[in-house]
């Protein structure tokens, strides 16, 4: 099993280095574009939401990111000490309609759920642990 | 992200390269909206050089699309292939926007109206 871990501050400016970290992991394990896209989009959705809305104060917080390849499954995890937030409890977005009628937003969680094979959320010891998994074999 | 903005047969061409995510979606959206506000009535966004678009990017596209409708302009997309196509399908934006398979067809359709 191959593991990678990264710790970032709750600042949007960190997202560029997160992207590079994911791309290095993808290159090291020859992940397909489909799996790599799922990881890049999922982390972008989870982290941009967490950093923008996930804290009740203005202080600096640490967010821990993990990636692991176990057999033919990529396992990703985001652990943070933000306010409790279960993305799986959010209602599905309204996807129908043309450009004029479509609401702006609500898509991020839909991407997270759809692009991954499995998404789990736990609140443990005042920390959020969001895990998402995707098989590398079904590309 | 690099964004090339040009003209082809009287149509404003927007060609972003790289990805459209929460880091750069606002910059991308602001550029397209500025183009429309400056009077561009026929706009084509060619996504052929884009690897993926996150929800922030779709939000920017949607805002630009709404602005084009409000100003009675035309905005259409091409180069929607591979992972970008999959994300358009998942988000159901494949049916919300006018998307054409080739750049030439896209330009022709936008000019026709």
Image (spheres, rainbow, N blue to C red):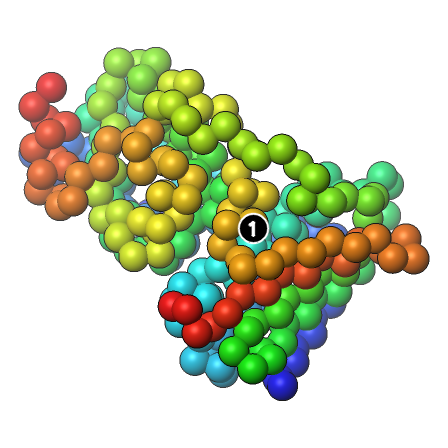
Figure quadrant of residue B6? top left
Q: Is residue B40 left or right of residue A108?
A: left
Q: Residue furthest bottom?
A: A1
Which x, y percent locates residue A29?
Answer: 49, 82
Neighbour class for label 1 at 10 Å: few (<14), some, many (≥20)? Answer: many
Which x, y percent locates residue B3?
Answer: 33, 47
> Mark 1 sits on what residue?
A112
Report whether residue A54 is seen.
yes
- Residue at figure coordinates x 54%, y 60% from the top left: A117
Figure quadrant of residue B11? top left
Quarter that holds the N terminus of chain A? bottom right
Q: Is residue B86 left or right of residue B6?
A: right
Figure quadrant of residue B61? top left
Q: Residue furthest right?
A: A125
Quarter that holds the C terminus of chain A? bottom left
- Residue at figure coordinates x 14%, y 28% from the top left: B110
Which x, y percent locates residue A56?
Answer: 85, 39
- Residue at figure coordinates x 65%, y 80% from the top left: A3
- Relative to the observer, which residue lies in front, B12 or A50? A50
Which x, y percent locates residue A58?
Answer: 83, 42
Count up the numbered dots: 1
- Relative to the observer, which residue lies in front, B74 or A4? A4
Q: Is residue A73 above or below residue B112?
A: below
Element on which disc 1 rests: helix
Output the chain of dot 1: A
- Residue at figure coordinates x 75%, y 65% from the top left: A64
Q: Is residue A48 left or right of residue A9?
A: left
Report whether residue B33 is seen.
no
């Amino acid at each position: 099993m191959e593991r990678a871990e990264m710790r970032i501050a709750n600042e949007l400016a960190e997202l560029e280095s997160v992207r590079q970290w994911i791309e290095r992991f993808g290159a090291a394990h020859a992940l397909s574009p489909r799996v790599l896209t799922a990881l890049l989009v999922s982390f972008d959705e989870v982290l941009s939401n967490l950093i923008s809305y996930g804290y009740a104060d203005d202080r600096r917080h640490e967010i821990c990111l993990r990636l692991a390849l176990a057999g033919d499954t990529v396992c990703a995890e985001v652990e943070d000490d933000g306010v409790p937030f279960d993305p799986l409890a959010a209602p599905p977005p309204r996807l129908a309609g043309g450009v004029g009628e479509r609401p702006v937003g609500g898509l991020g969680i839909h991407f997270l759920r759809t692009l991954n094979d499995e998404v789990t959320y736990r609140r443990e010891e005042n920390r959020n642990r969001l895990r998402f998994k995707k098989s590398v074999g079904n590309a | 992200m690099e964004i090339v903005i040009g003209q082809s047969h009287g149509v404003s061409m927007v060609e972003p390269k790289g990805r459209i995510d929460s880091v750069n979606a606002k910059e991308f959206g602001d550029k397209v909206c500025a183009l429309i506000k400056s009077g561009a009535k026929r706009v084509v966004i060619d996504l052929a050089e884009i690897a993926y678009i996150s929800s922030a990017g779709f939000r920017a596209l949607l805002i630009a699309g709404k602005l084009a409708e409000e100003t009675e302009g035309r905005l259409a997309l091409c180069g929607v292939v591979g992972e970008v196509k999959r994300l358009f399908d998942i988000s159901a934006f494949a049916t919300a926007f006018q998307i054409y398979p080739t750049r030439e067809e896209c330009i022709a359709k936008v000019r026709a109206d």
